[in-house]
Image: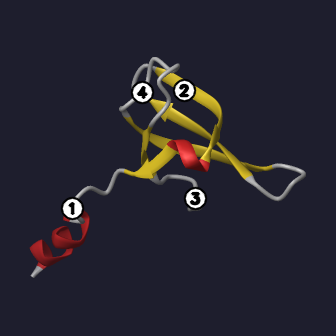
């Protein structure tokens, strides 16, 4: 899965102090192999060079879509 800047994601990296936390992608860098690595910012810091397979969307149940209905 690919992500874009400003996407909310959950980091899954047992070696990171931010494992399981929700953060925001602040930078996408394409490697020379055509893959992307990500910089993810959290409340207490950031992780650099995160692979896509270590991230999942933080959208949860899709609650953000239901927020649009509040405008009616």
Q: Earlier in the sequence, mark 4 or mark 3?
A: 3
Image point 24% across, 65% down: which residue?
A: 62
The picture places residue 71, in percent across and down from the top left corner, at: 14, 76
Image point 82% across, 59% down: which residue?
A: 34
Quadrant of residue 49 in the image? Answer: top right
The picture places residue 59, in percent across and down from the top left corner, at: 31, 57
The residue where tag 3 is placed is 4
Label 1: how many residues lie within 10 Å, few (<14), some (14-19) or many (20+)? few
Numbered disc total: 4
Give the residue at the far bottom of this rendering.
72
Per the rendering, the mark at residue 61 is 1
Q: Nearer the viewer, mark 3 or mark 1?
A: 1
The residue where tag 4 is placed is 19
Query: Marks 2/4: CA distance?
Result: 12 Å
- Comparing 32 with 15, the one in front is 15
Query: Marks 3/2: CA distance?
Result: 16 Å
């Amino acid at each position: 899965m690919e992500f874009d800047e400003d996407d909310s994601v959950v980091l899954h990296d047992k070696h990171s102090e931010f494992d399981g936390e929700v953060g925001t992608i602040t930078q996408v860098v394409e490697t020379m192999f055509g893959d992307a690595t990500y910089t993810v910012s959290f409340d207490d810091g950031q992780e650099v060079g995160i692979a896509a397979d270590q991230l999942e969307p933080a959208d949860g149940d899709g609650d953000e879509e239901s927020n649009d209905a509040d405008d009616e």
